[in-house]
């Protein structure tokens, strides 16, 4: 195993934990794929110049986190995310250079999506809306009508900016949210995710600085990392992005873009106050930086409607606005749209054409027909009521089943609880131990550009009915209780081990 572990022998972090952290990073980052065989405790201890018990403790922790498995006489192996041990192999030579942080963020996102789809796992990990509220019948009627009435034009190529009639309908929909956008300002995309990618390709060159919130949406981290951007992270609190931390970054790094989710932020659930929205817009104007406003969740509010979108308050053309129906109507249709300031329209339209010519004609016609004939307001009311009931069911279950020291705030919209764990327990431990009990969470570090945030997990509350939510939260409560007890025992054990052995 040609790996180099740098140990800080004077530091505060115990040596066994440094070894554990290093190996965990390699495993989650993919450098030690499932099936890899680890060196024996004796040989690793010799190479690192530490006591064998130190390496043994590191391995033991990784075993109880579900990352490793030990076979007497054969050795210690890396487990797959499903807890199975594939045929042992040696780690392949990495064919290209990728920083560990990039790899692991992607690996975690992939695992989350895979687990949410697995029937055996009760998953709170993914950001998916309640499937039983997808308007299947309404969409079937819409597609049938479109095929009958429009015939080939629903199957023909379109212009890159998308079906004009649909952009007109979206323009009317946006005006209800206080956004004045002519159809010519609207560009239809294949989901909001594609819109983020198109903006990054248009405005950001490798090495350019970009401001992201910390934490933020994983898909946005992926886009900007893939683009080779230098990511500047601004913390988020209960009032959204901490705008006062932004100004020094604008002065020093002159970023090309500020990406924000001001309303029902993913993953923290907070919304930016009106005051901060105004401050952010003023800074964008002063430093001439465009804002990419991702408004994926604002229509999912549970009590009162949120503050107006940044785009509705923008008087100087600094906001690129992203919207869609993924979280409310039909996530898998892959439809979204952006409202583009005039100076960027040509470049973004060209980027869309380069990416995929245009969004599927049939899908655009179907969305248009759905909006026209079925309407979205009745549906939105239903889905808000269902999600509110599920949010409250999760809050009640957490009150009952979570041990003291677990903290969360009640989200006023969106799909997630952002949960802070007790100090002794980490997100990855909850992730793997939870999985062993049949329940999945999204680990906090997936949402932080620098992969900090081990004290957080994100729980989606929209996917399961209340009884399943109760069952999953009970299992998670047991998981956290088990980890607290294990941490307590480990502390006691360490106190008993003579210092000379460590
Ligand atoms: C903040 C945010 N933006 C964008 C997306 C992706 O949305 P779409 O399905 O429109 O691509 C998500 C999905 O989780 C999200 O949370």
Image: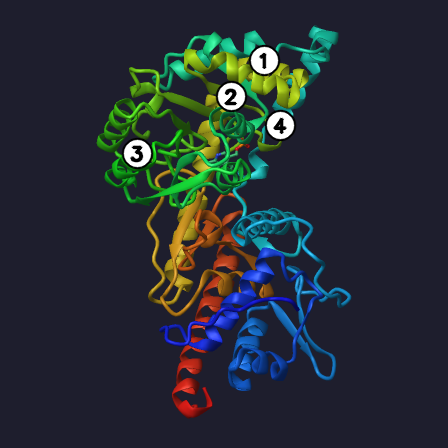
Q: Residues within 10 Å of mark 2 (few under 14, many from 20)?
A: many
Q: Residues within 10 Å of mark 1 (few under 14, many from 20)?
A: many
Q: Are marks 3 and 4 in contact (CB under 8 Å)?
A: no
Q: How is the image coloured?
A: rainbow
- The answer to whether mark 4 is within 8 Å of ligand 1 is no
Label 1 or label 4, whichever lies nearer to me, is 1
Q: On the image, numbered disc 4 is attached to which residue?
A: 333
Q: Residues within 10 Å of mark 3 (few under 14, many from 20)?
A: many
Q: On the image, numbered disc 3 is attached to which residue?
A: 250
Q: Dot 1: what SS?
A: loop
How far apart marks 1 and 4 lie (CA) works out to 15 Å
What residue is shown at x 54% (from left), y 25% (from top)?
A: 198
Q: Position of residue 320 (x, y in %)?
A: 41, 22
How far apart marks 3 and 4 lie (CA) works out to 37 Å
Q: On the image, numbered disc 1 is attached to which residue?
A: 162
Q: Specify which label sits upstream in the sequence, 1 or 2.
A: 1
């Amino acid at each position: 195993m040609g790996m180099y572990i740098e140990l800080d022998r004077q530091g505060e972090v115990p040596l066994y934990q440094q070894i554990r952290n290093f190996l965990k990073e390699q495993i989650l980052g993919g450098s030690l794929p499932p099936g890899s065989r680890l060196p024996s405790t004796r040989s690793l201890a010799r190479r690192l110049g530490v006591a064998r018990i130190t390496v043994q403790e590191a391995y033991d922790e990784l075993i109880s986190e579900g990352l490793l498995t030990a076979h007497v006489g054969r050795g210690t192996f890396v487990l797959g995310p499903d807890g199975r041990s594939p045929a042992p192999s040696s780690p392949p030579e990495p064919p290209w250079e990728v920083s560990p942080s990039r790899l692991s963020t992607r690996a975690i996102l992939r695992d989350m999506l895979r687990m949410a789809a697995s029937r055996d796992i009760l998953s709170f990990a993914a950001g998916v809306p309640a499937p039983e509220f997808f308007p299947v019948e309404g969409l079937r009627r819409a597609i049938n009508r479109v095929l009958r009435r429009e015939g080939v034009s629903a199957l023909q190529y379109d212009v890159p900016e998308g079906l004009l009639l649909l952009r007109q309908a979206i323009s009317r929909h946006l005006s209800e949210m206080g956004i004045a956008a002519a159809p010519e300002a609207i560009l239809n995309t294949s989901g909001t995710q594609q819109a983020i990618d198109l903006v990054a390709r248009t405005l950001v060159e490798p090495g350019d600085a970009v401001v992201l919130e910390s934490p933020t949406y994983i898909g946005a981290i992926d886009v900007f990392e893939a683009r080779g951007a230098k990511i500047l992270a601004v913390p988020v609190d209960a009032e959204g992005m901490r705008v006062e931390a932004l100004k020094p970054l604008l002065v020093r790094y002159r970023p090309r873009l500020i990406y924000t989710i001001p309303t029902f932020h993913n993953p923290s659930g907070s919304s930016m106050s009106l005051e901060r929205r105004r401050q952010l817009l003023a800074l964008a104007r002063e430093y001439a930086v465009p804002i990419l406003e991702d408004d994926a969740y604002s229509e999912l509010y549970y009590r009162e409607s949120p503050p107006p979108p940044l785009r509705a308050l923008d008087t100087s053309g600094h906001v690129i606005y992203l919207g869609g129906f993924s979280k409310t109507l039909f996530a898998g249709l892959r439809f979204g749209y952006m409202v583009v300031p005039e100076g960027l329209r040509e470049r973004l339209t060209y980027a869309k054409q380069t990416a995929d010519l245009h969004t599927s004609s049939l899908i655009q016609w179907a969305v248009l027909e759905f909006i026209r004939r079925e309407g979205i307001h009745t549906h939105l009311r239903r889905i808000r009521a269902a999600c509110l009931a599920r949010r409250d069911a999760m809050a009640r279950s957490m009150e009952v089943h979570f041990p003291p020291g677990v903290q969360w705030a009640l989200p006023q919209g969106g799909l997630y609880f952002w949960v802070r764990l007790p100090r002794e327990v980490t997100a990855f431990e909850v992730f793997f131990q939870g999985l062993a009990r049949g329940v999945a969470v999204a680990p906090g570090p997936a949402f932080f550009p620098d992969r900090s945030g081990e004290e957080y997990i994100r729980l989606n509350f929209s996917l399961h009915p209340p009884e399943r939510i109760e069952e999953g939260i009970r299992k998670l409560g047991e998981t956290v209780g088990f980890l607290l007890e294990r941490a307590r025992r480990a502390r006691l054990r360490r106190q008993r081990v003579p210092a000379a052995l460590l």
